[in-house]
Image (cartoon, helix red, strand yellow):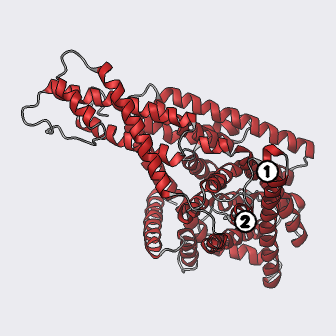
Amino acid sequence: MDPIGTITWIVLFVLTTVAVTGIVGRLGWSAPVALVVVGGAVSFVPGIPEVEVQPELILYGILPPLLFAAAIRTSVIDVRARRDSILLLSVGLVAFTVVVVGFATFALIPAVTLAAAFAFAAVVAPTDAIAVTAIAGRLGLPRRVVTILEGESLLNDATALVALNASIAAIVSVVTPAEIGIEFVVAVVVGTGVGFGVGWIVTFVRSRLHSAVLDTSLTLVTPFAAFLLGEFLHGSGVLAVVLAGLYLGYRAPAVSSAEARVAERLNWRTIKFLLENTVFLFIGLNLKGILQGAMSTGPGFWPTVVICIGILAALVASRFAWVMGTTLLYRKGPRRLRERGWAWRNGVAVSSAGVRGVVTLAAVFLLPKETPGREYLQFLAFVVVVASLLGGLALPAIIRRLKLPKPSLVQELAERRLLMAEARQAGIDLLDGQQLPEDEKHVAALLRSDAGFLGETLDAYGPDASIPQLEAKYRLRRAMLDAERAAVLKARAEGRYQEPAIVAALQAIDAEETALRAQFPKEGEAG
């Protein structure tokens, strides 16, 4: 395709994604399902060229930023608090699903080898971080359940793709279980080291940058750098991206400027929106080719219906069996586990949230051409994603029947107010030590009486306000904001407040600091 044609397609993709998402959002429908339907319908329009999926583009161009965008918004504190539950789901459940669905696929489709069946199982094993987060946020699930679902969906991608790589190796060559085990360990160890290493290096550089543009530019290339380095060193590039994102998201409030953090949040929200929704539209445009390949290589219509039902049943059953078994272990196991156990209703909620999405749709195109029944397996992955998305629409009814306790909005609001009051007091306590002899006394008095004002204009002190007076006001308020941020970060490290209160407080401080610097920037900060 010529450059003009490529640009035209990109523009059409973005416009269609924005239009469809905006319309279905107003109607309360599922945007991913709508985009797949729209893309699928367009693929059958005469004259529409067939869209060819490039696996390398998906693996190196789409997955890293998608995973990074989810990771930087995930609470490290919450993940650390629930790390055992999250690991049981993101590692144990994925491995269990690969085995169960792999053997089920091998039994249902005689033309598929065991290695290809395991590769397909690895493709459909991980849940979708974006879909799960959207569902959890909309339903008002308990904070603990939300943390487990988000942590699982973020980390299980790495486990599934490591399993996929091992299965692909078994497809194209002969490998032993010992070799697969060694490859898995190496991938995890190297990926972990690269992720934390890249995160530390980028954090060190960001702490010495004084330009939001440079800071933002650095974060935009970070997921690609982590992924490429991880893959080059024979580790898990996906795990490297996830851990780098978690590390940077945790350290950002302490090392980067407020402008950089505000820009980072907006940029990555936009990137995540465009990529995840465009992928659904893109896969929909492949529907015609997928169906043609399935019809030419598949066993027929009714056998295909049976196969689809069997694979979906294996997916649902494996998730329910593992999660409910884990729930039983926590409730009846050793005392340390019983102290961290959850109710049966929580187990049912976690079991029901098995929505598949972008990673599954993207990973299925990584299957090599040597894979037996490749086109048919791509079709089955498509069916799994659409069925799980449709099944996700029933989650609100399931959650209502479970009668899970919703987060207390009153308590969250009280926590935010208490934390902001604590932070503002820290700023006031710092004020006396920051005053210079030449500062006018009423400037500090005004700051002390109203430490929470936002974006006060340069005319707030009246037409007779002097430049030194304004400089003192902004210098002192900036110092107070630094003290407020430090107080919030200390409270986060001590675990005295829940994550929503921490995030709200940090964003409020960033918003005020950004407004102040826009009105009276320091020298060299304008860029």
Residue in the image at 71% along x and 51% along y: 156
* The furthest residue to the left: 464
How far separated are the C-alphas under marks 1 and 2?
A: 26 Å
Q: Nearer the viewer, residue 34 or 168?
A: 34
Q: Nearer the viewer, residue 153 or 408?
A: 408
- Which image quarter is the C terminus in? top left
Q: Amino acid at mark 1?
A: Ala
Residue bearing the label numbered 1: 163
Q: Nearer the viewer, residue 473 or 231?
A: 473
Q: Nearer the viewer, residue 334 or 160?
A: 334
Q: Is residue 273 above or below residue 380?
A: above
Report whether 268 appears left or right of 282: left
Task: Find residue 458 and report its horizontal and vertical position in percent.
Answer: 17, 37
Mark 1 or mark 2, earlier in chain: 1
Task: Find residue 398 and report its horizontal and vertical position in percent.
Answer: 65, 72
Task: Find residue 228 and report its horizontal and vertical position in percent.
Answer: 64, 39
- Note whether residue 490 is visible: yes
Q: Amino acid at mark 2?
A: Val
Q: Which disc number belongs to residue 111?
A: none
> How many numbered circles does the render carry?
2
Task: Find residue 500 and report its horizontal and vertical position in percent.
Answer: 50, 49
* The furthest residue to the top: 437
- Note whether residue 119 is visible: no
Residue in the image at 72% along x and 71% along y: 379
Classify mark 1: helix, strand or loop: helix
Q: Which disc number belongs to residue 348?
A: 2
